[in-house]
Image (tube, grey):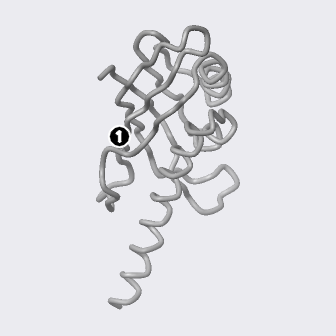
Amino acid sequence: MVSLLISALTIFTFTITTATQDIEKAFLQNNPKLLASLFSTLHPINVSLPDPIFFSDQITHHQAYFVFKNIFAFYSTFEFYSEQQPFIPEKANFIFKARWSFRDKKNNDQFPFYIFFFLIKEASSDGAKSSWRISEIKAKKI
């Protein structure tokens, strides 16, 4: 019984770690396709980003892909790291907080943000195993 519980917690923690690592990789590689693979397909994505990006709307996962494709075309990430220790959420959702610093490709201006990802546990449409999906992204300037 105890070993079964430990195994379940290990798998649960692994899926969280994989999701947060994929978010980090997507930003460091300026890869909207990898980020889009983490968006919820069942719910609209709420995205709210301050200046210089200044975008705030509730959009589909397809639209979110194009928003981040455009962002990564104009701004290059040079720093992205988690602001929290890995943990096991008690619910079917949690907030992942990171520091995101990026550079405007036109004039080299730099912008540091705290960025927050609201992740939810979501079953895939084909009924396969559930996984962590991004349902909201918010940021604030540091």
Q: Quadrant of the C terminus?
A: top left
- Measured along the vertical axis of the image, is residue 13 above or below residue 120? below
Residue 24 appears at what percent x and percent y?
A: 51, 44
- Measured along the vertical axis of the image, is residue 36 above or below residue 6? above
Q: Nearer the viewer, residue 25 or 120?
A: 25
User: Residue at 48% across / 36% down in the picture?
Assistant: 135
Q: Nearer the viewer, residue 56 or 29?
A: 29
Q: Quadrant of the N terminus?
A: bottom left
Residue 21 appears at what percent x and percent y?
A: 51, 52
User: Residue at 54% across / 15% down in the picture?
Assistant: 104
Query: Circle 1 sits in a helix, a strand or a loop, which is it?
Result: strand
Q: Say what amino acid the circle numbered 1 marks.
A: Lys
- Return the residue at label 1: 97
User: Residue at 42% across / 43% down in the picture?
Assistant: 81
User: Residue at 29% across / 59% down in the picture?
Assistant: 90
Left of 8 or right of it: where is 22? right
Q: In the picture, residue 67 is in which quadrant?
A: top right
Residue 119 appears at what percent x and percent y?
A: 44, 44
- Crowd tier of the residue under label 1, counting other residues whose Cα lies within 10 Å: few below 14, some 14–19, many 20 or above: many
Left of 108 or right of it: where is 2? left
Q: In the picture, residue 127 is in which quadrant?
A: bottom right
- Measured along the vertical axis of the image, is residue 108 above or below residue 13? above
Q: How many marks?
A: 1
